[in-house]
Image (spheres, rainbow, N blue to C red):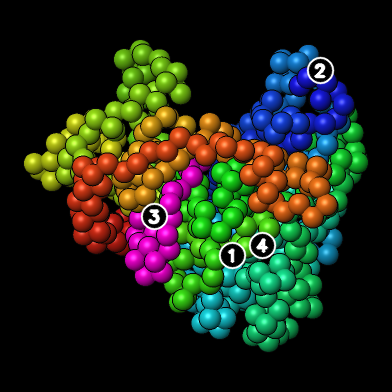
Amino acid sequence: MTKQAILDGNATLGIELGSTRIKAVLIGEDHAPIASGSYEWENQLINGVWTYAMEDVLHGLKSCYAALSDDVQRLYGIPVTRLSAIGISAMMHGYLPFDKDGKQLAAFRTWRNTMTERAAVKLSDLFGFNIPQRWTIAHLYQAILNKETHVQDITFLTTLSGYVHFLLTGERVLGVDDASGMFPIDSGTNDYNKKMMAQFDALVSGAFGGSLGDILPKVLSAGEPAGTLTEQGARLLDPSGRLAAGIPLCPPEGDAGTGMVATNTVAARTGNLSAGTSIFAMVVMEKALSHMYPEIDVITTPAGAPVAMVHCNNFTSDIDAWMRLLNETLKTFGCSVDKDAFYKTLYEKALLGEPDAGGLVSYNYYAGEAITGFEEGRPLFARMPGSDMSLANFMRSLIFSAIGTLRLGMDILTEKEHLQMESLLGHGGFFKTEGVGQNLMAAALGVPVAVMESAGEGGAWGIALLAAYMARKEAGEPLTAYLSEKVFGENKGKLAFPEKKDVQGFAAFMKRYEAGLAAERAAVHSLV
């Protein structure tokens, strides 16, 4: 049945360009993954800017798709020639400006950069709406404040998913979730907020040709057609020539939106956690927040509903660095361990640590963190002389430190806005080791955390589902109904409840964590 679906062109492809991996997932008519491929990459800090070269984007796309094609050939003995639909997703936010000839005018400034504080503060005050530093509009305004000469030549400004989609289709469009990380969205119209756009145009009059609306991508909602794969786009993905042009594409989306879809949390009062290189928690709201909070983003679902988002720039990068060091130690003694088994074993070790991690504390700040007021980061590990420096406590402290900043942001939603969450659905690489990230996250946030079997597939599966929704939905069928009835059914995921001793242990850890932020601040100031 799966083989025939591929031969008939009824399989659907999703590709997501994540922070450390570009992943492709092929799903069948039952929405389950049937093949996958990936390509690992990493951002670079060049001239003070966290970036990826566009040459790496193109190479990664081709390599990722080739790996998926090889997987299909290995599993089913056939090539991929036709597809029902394709979806492209990527890291949200950032800054990718182009001139009228399609020339890139500045290095890609990713979500990880915290260089736009002056712009973000001024725009937040102007709009009465929180504009985080990583948002595209903050980067644009900061470039204007910096008097960067390229600004006057901008005719197209987009995100990474929007750029890749443009390469494949020639269409300058963006899904509403990804667009909500460029500029505030009016959920009543599912388009950019016109009042705020007029305010911005008045603020920067003459900075570039035309108005802001002239250079931003057109906003599309889930289910709307977003163009078709051109011959040039087909060859970009598949230089072998086997993949046919003409395949429809859904609106390109951000990793926040695909995370909501992958966890079936697009309805009001549902929420999810996306945990990988960065981490963010999102809760779909029934009404607007009562106040503007610098720590809370307001974005949308792929269908345009408002979402409160707590975003932290740093999550697993520091854990991964320590894991590489520990693995190097093994190799020094001539030992070799499978990477997945290595991570699984050490993550599970964290469950054996003392509830408060034995007095150990660390900071995973590779980059700055807006929630705690850091423009830069310095990974830092500390302990008291009497702390129990065991492997179990060490691993637990690394995981707790990765969650610490998120907890500070979530406290605003629960304590000040009184948002109720029955549970949160987790997805991303952090949740692949069964029971570890899930249980420790539940203890840290004080709310049950569910994980589905598809948690490791993440956003690539989520954007494949959005592509399938566009191709297969019935007239008038909302995204919430399509996901609940045709994709997830009764699958609510395995639920982990916070245990009292772990909740108390994390609270004790957080007291040290908050007190030690002064040491992290001193490290940023002193270590240059």
The reply to whether the magenta stretch includes residue 423 is: yes
How many residues crowd mark 3 within 10 Å: few (<14), some (14–19), many (20+)?
Answer: many
- Disc 1 residue type (three-letter): Pro
Residue where numbered disc 4 is placed:
304
Marks 2 and 1 in Cβ contact (< 8 Å):
no
Marks 3 and 1 in Cβ contact (< 8 Å):
no
- Disc 4 residue type (three-letter): Gly
> Looking at the image, which residue is at 47% across and 32% down?
432
**Where 30 falls versus 468 (above or below)?**
above
What whole-number distance in Å separates the C-alpha atoms at marks 3 and 4? Answer: 24 Å
Secondary element type, mark 3: helix
Image coordinates for residue 453, horizontal then vertical, percent: 53, 31
Residue where numbered disc 1 is placed:
306
Q: Which residues are magenta?
A: 407-427
Residue where numbered disc 3 is placed:
406
Q: Disc 3 vs disc 4: which is toward the camera?
A: 4
Secondary element type, mark 1: strand
Please tell me which of labels 2 and 1 falls first in the chain. Answer: 2
Please tell me which of labels 3 and 4 falls first in the chain. Answer: 4
